[in-house]
Image (spheres, rainbow, N blue to C red):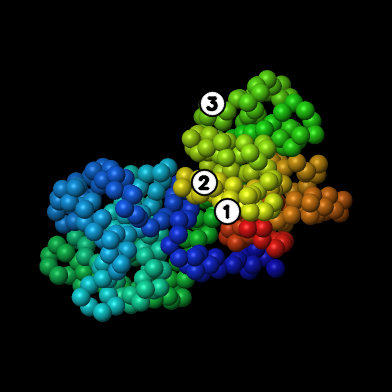
Amino acid sequence: MGARELYSDAAKLEQARGIRERDVGIGDICLTERQASIDDRDQLRAFYEHLSSQSRYFRFFGKPRVGTIVEDVMHALASRDAVTLVAEVDHRIVAVAQYFPTSSAGRAEAAFAIADAHQGRGIGTKLLERLGVVARSRGITSFEAYLLHDNQKMRQVLVDSGFALTWDRLDGQIRHVVFSPAESPQLHEKEKVRARAAAQTSLRPFFRPTTVAVIGAGRRRGGIGAEIFDNLVATGFHGPIIPVNSAGGSVEGVPVVRSVTNIEGEVSLAVIAVPCDQVAGVVDDCIAKGVKALLIISAGFAETGAGGREREAAILDKVRAAGIRLIGPNCMGVLNTDPAVRLNATFSLVYPPLGRVALSTQSGALGLAILDYAARLNIGFSTFASIGNKADVSSNDLLQYWADDPGTDVILLWNSTSTR
């Protein structure tokens, strides 16, 4: 069966998870959607202070003081009936979406504010989608919104949402729109398209990185970090490969950087192969550096019991707050045989030939066995991912990524009982 036929409706799965913090790929950014809290007062103040006068006017039909706006948001957060969601990029709020129940039973008024630098990038549409999920769970049967006639960007947000819209004009300047947040085939199709686009954006740094840092790479062959670094070099990865080790020195003639924060330029993918008690500190460095994707090879997490689960949960909280995606921990790595990439960020001795099969396994041992057996049969792969404890990236994410991958026709998945 082809990859497109195997596509899983992950949008429905995401809806079932409610409004907990989650990462979403939008265009060339990765943002975090979550419910706002009273602890966001200072961030919200900064967000509204930096809105342009036009954006503030479009949102509030005037120019109220920022202090008044923030107090109104705090009041909404204290209400059980109102809902306030925020989107963050690099720990900064870049969008606020709210709904407030009206006097009409089952109806709520929706409103949005998007940072000027992030308008037109799909963030408002994603937040509206999330508001719809919350509304359905709370018995809201219709939304309404008021827009100034010149606010074409917010009009486009509503049009792109997939909701069926009914427009009317209250006067020459204000437009009124009513729509139901109920599920529909059109809404599901729009959500599928957005979910696939989000997965492709957020997972691209794993399979098509521009720069790879191997943290834990050492001179001693046989060590996991050293083997991964050697594999990247041997297969001819098309980009800089940077060994990172606090001991310094060099690996295969390449100068070692003592910390990922000391690397000049952008780092797409960080491969972490250090003892488990050092992983949290390395993750902090990667977040500070702005690394886009983390591949944690290190074991010693959820697969080891309660203590390991706590360590894993703490790391996951950090990367989600930073809007970074994570494969692993306790995994084997990822491959991409595309001649334009040639990525072997694994410790496998086998680099498979180019093919049109994508493979995901939870078990690193099984992954090694499959790659070895397939190579002996001359079966090629497009990409491969060992997801280990699947703390963040799961098979559903990979299905969405591979569904539209032009280099993949067949997807193979293997999962064991969850370690979480």
In the image, which disc is placed on residue 262? 3
Of pointers 3 and 1, the one earlier in the residue sequence: 3
Element type where label 1 sits in the image: loop
| Front residue of this view, candidates 327 and 3 | 327
User: Residue at coordinates 26% horizontally, 79% vertically from top-left?
Assistant: 105
Pointer 1: residues within 10 angstroms few (<14), some, or many (20+)?
some
Q: How many marks?
A: 3
Q: Which residue is the site of mark 2?
A: 319
Of pointers 1 and 2, the one earlier in the residue sequence: 2
Element type where label 2 sits in the image: helix
User: Residue at coordinates 23% horizontally, 51% vertically from top-left?
Assistant: 70
Query: Foreground mark, 3 or 2?
Result: 2
Q: Three-letter amino acid code at disc 2?
A: Val
Q: Which residue is the site of mark 1?
A: 392
Q: In the rendered image, which quarter contains the N terminus?
A: bottom right
Q: Can residue 115 be seen in this view?
A: no
Write down the quadrant of residue 278 in the picture.
top right
User: Residue at coordinates 16% horizontally, 64% vertically from top-left?
Assistant: 174
Left or right: where does residue 50 sit relative to residue 246? left
357 relative to 168, above or below = above
| Front residue of this view, candidates 120 and 114 | 114
Left or right: where does residue 416 sit relative to residue 192? right
Q: Three-letter amino acid code at disc 1?
A: Asp
Expressed as whole percent of the image width and height from the top left, the position of residue 13 reads: 53, 67
